[in-house]
Image (cartoon, rainbow, N blue to C red):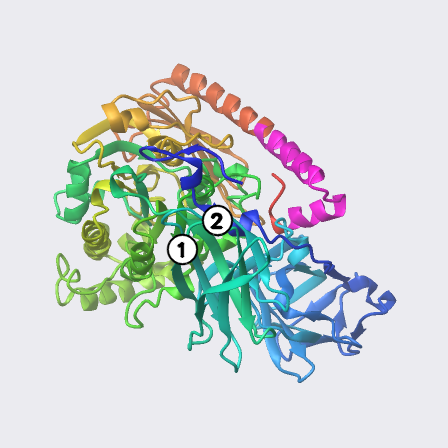
Amino acid sequence: MLCCITACGPSLKPDHKSVDLIESNGIVQQQVPSLVWHFADRQEDPTTIWTPSMALSEAGTLLVESGPPTQGAFPRPLFDASLLRAVIIRARASERCSISISGLNLSMQRIQLAELNLPASREMLSLSVKVDSLATSFVSQIEFQTQDCSVEVDSLRFVFDDSHPTKVAWRDVAFNGIYRHAIRAQDDPMHLDLETHQGDWLDFAVAWTDDRIPTFIIESIDSQNRATQIWQSSPAQADQWHPFKVHLPIGIEALRFRTEPVDANAYWATLALRKKHNRPQMPLNVVLVIIDTLRSDHLGPYGYARATSPNLNLLASEGTVFLNTYAASTWTKPSIPSILTSVEPRLLNGFDLYGQVPEHLTTIAEAMKDAGFATFSSSSVSYSGRQSNLDQGVDVMVEQSALNVAADLAPSKTAQAVTNQFVPWLQQHADQPFFATLHFMDPHSPYKTYPPHLGLWSHEGSEREFEMMLQQVEPHITNDERKYRRMPDANELAQAGLDPRQFAAYEENWYDESIHGADAQIERIRSILRQLELDKHTIIVVISDHGEEFLDHGSHFHGHHIFGELARVPWVIFDPRHPFGKTISSAVSLLDVAPTVTSLCGLPTPATFRGTSQMSAVVSGTDGERSQPITTELQPNKGRSGSSFLALLDGEWKVMRTTLSTSETRWTLFNVFKDPLDQHDLADQYPTLVNQLRAKVSLWENHLDQLATSFEKASHQQLMDQGYSEEEMELLRSLGYLGYE
């Protein structure tokens, strides 16, 4: 259970490594089947009574249309909603449509089970959604409902705890948007074997949801099975996590966890045995800050004239700045999973809006947790959290719904709220090595921010003047998505008689002010680290997932191409062991972030990481030895048409392939050092070079195709070794845990 791991700084001795008691103990098999309904066969299903009014298609599938809920009833209580882990629907819609799936209990109370957003598609699509923690309630009837659209449903599947890849009784439970790996208190007390040493403490949280306040009790058990109570608490507030830190006596061999009354609806969560470390010998902590939608050329370390990032400037002067960092894709859904797994998006289901990171891939949080680090993560948008399966290896996962962004602010202004959630956790884990991922979204549109940052470059009449320009140009916006976002392109602005650069200047003023707001939280975090005397024991990494366009190529936003304004991102890393300013001009990839962090921490690089460690750049200013090319890729979301893009870097050159929806392919060439925003296509001047780079693109794609096959085989064999049947593996594919398309 305990092994010698080398971590950040000094080696961790076996008896100094934190033990994840959830992973090491208490695994319980449950025999709850998954439930599947194929609606065309419903007359032959003896367990289901479908209402006569339900509409059928010619193929026998279920039609759910706007209006009263479409219902199906069951002759007996069907299942306990608290055990539900995921809902999978196979359906299609002629236009984008949201379908809500609810259950009615025996008292006819409605329980929201899941809501899925279907893209327009002629083909049946299988979509899955993880289910948040639900209270115990036996569901006897199912309801479907849509608004202003219709859906054709082929099948519905409910997935329960033992159908999930972990196959354990522990499950992710949320209160107020904060997820922890938890187990429901049971009639039989939970018994965990362990061995305690000087300074050990128990890290855990409890929660309850009921009319009765339970008492949580921890007892030590000796060799004679005698119990000695060492802690108890009756937290008064229901429906929220209560974290605790309990120091343990030396020599404990077993602990027992129980609640009174025994039938209380209560949870124990994220149980871990932590080891107190003397500060000089303590391994280094890591804080990874991902600032969404942040262009590198709007920051001081990259030559920007405005003082948008005074605190990042200071961090950069004490650390290392990578001047030419490229994202693996140009919007959040494919990019952040690639950062946290060091794997290209096409191997991560990254271009499937509902795709999830395959379970067998290792996240950086998993690598750190396996080495004994406490782990924390925040998500400012669903794509960077549990929806993408990025809670792997995370002790505490703070989702967007927990952030409590002020009602008068745009929902993208999350940096302050994320830091508010992180600081108490940081204070509790000050004497424990930790790894934290903080996702700030402030630069994302809507750009307008809050005082004292608002008004640094905008003026009092900016909003009124900008609104007048929008009203003037809106009749000329032809694209539905741009019309919804109120983001005209350069041609539409010109048609309206407006100056495109003047229009973009308003946006960039607010954008820069939002950057300034996110930057302030960097100093806030560093200040807390100084107060806790952790500033000399913490690595800080600041990156972005992609940039933003302000008419650089005639348009707005991100995720519509892969030119430099979207693909080039900041990367600043501060390691207190190497406190001197360095700039690295060679091109690097965001896939390099995870292996760089693990290398700086003295940890082995996980076998599935595909990036290149840049530790030598941080330590001595020399380039890492790259084994994989740097690429940026963008494909249409699964089930939708559109152009796809792929760029490959080779020294100073970037070759880009654009495949239009008509299947027409174009190749362009840019010198990234002389033309960082890809404004000047040089393909006609260097046709031989283009052909050479096209050959490298083909080799890279062939390699990824082979890798996808090997990933699939490795995952398949791993599950077979664990006793999964072919039917269970097909279920995992539908959930997104397997399969590369």
| Closest to the observer, 640 or 76 | 76
| Closest to the observer, 699 or 681 | 699
For the stretch drawn in magenta, the main secondary structure is helix
**Can you name the residue that lies furthest to the bottom here?**
107
Q: Residues within 10 Å of mark 2 (few under 14, many from 20)?
A: many
Reply yes or no: does residue 139 show up in magenta. no
Q: Is residue 73 left or right of residue 311?
A: right
Reply yes or no: does residue 720 show up in magenta. yes
**Can you name the residue that lies furthest to the top here?**
688
Q: Which mark is residue 70?
A: none
Q: Mark 1 points at which residue?
A: 379
Q: Name the residue under label 2.
A: 390
Q: Which secondary structure, mark 1?
A: loop
Q: Position of residue 630 (x, y in %)?
A: 40, 28
Which residues fall within the magenta stretch?
Answer: 707-734
Q: In which quarter of the image is residue 524?
A: bottom left
